[in-house]
Amino acid sequence: MPAERKALPVIDPARCTGCGWCVAVCPPHVLSLEVKAWRKTSLLHDEAGCTGCAKCAVKCPFGAITMHRQATPVVR
Ligand code: SF4
Ligand code: SF4
């Protein structure tokens, strides 16, 4: 099985406003809004399902998402 490194979105909860744009734009629907400490923030609930396309990071109007390459290769 081929091994590859992929980048995953890392969401900065301090910058995230809970607007939901990233959730709407994610093709495999692996992002969701989570209510924590009375505020909504985006959450990657399915790392394995994320394709690393970075559409969420491009779409976020608040610069809350950065793509980080996995430290270890992901086998899919
Ligand atoms: S688009 Fe950005 S600010 Fe909006 S919910 Fe997603 S991470 Fe948060
Ligand atoms: S990188 Fe692509 S697949 Fe992964 S959470 Fe963002 S929009 Fe969804």
Image (cartoon, rainbow, N blue to C red):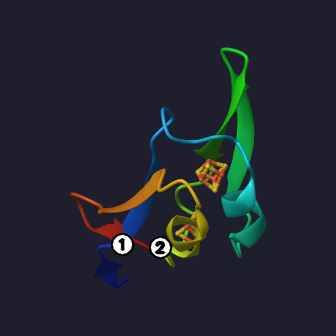
Query: Can you give x and y, in whole percent of width and height, for residue 46 in the image?
Result: 61, 53
Please tell me whether residue 28 is drawn above or below residue 46 in the rendered image: below
Query: Can you give x and y, in whole percent of width and height, for residue 58 in the image?
Result: 52, 73
Please tell me whether residue 20 is drawn above or below residue 13 in the rendered image: below
Label 2 crowd (10 A; few <14 / some 14-19 / many >=20): some
Whether the residues at callouts 2 and 1 have beta carbons within 8 Å, the answer is: yes
At horizontal 51% and vertical 79% (from top left) the residue drawn is 53
Tell me how far mark 2 sits from mark 1, CA to CA.
6 Å
Q: Residue furthest left?
A: 71
Total marks placed = 2
Query: Can you give x and y, in whole percent of width and height, for residue 26 in the image?
Result: 68, 70
**Res 68 quadrant in image:** bottom left
Label 1 crowd (10 A; few <14 / some 14-19 / many >=20): some
Instruction: Give 76 or 64, whichever is nearer the viewer.
Output: 64
**Res 37 quadrant in image:** top right
Q: Which residue type carries mark 1? A: Lys
Residue 52, disc? 2
Q: What is the quadrant of the N terminus in the image?
A: bottom left
Residue with the mark numbered 1: 6
Of mark 2 and mark 1, the one earlier in the sequence is 1
On the rendering, which quadrant does ligand 2 occupy?
Answer: bottom right
Please tell me whether residue 30 is drawn above or below residue 40 in the rendered image: below
Q: Residue furthest front?
A: 61
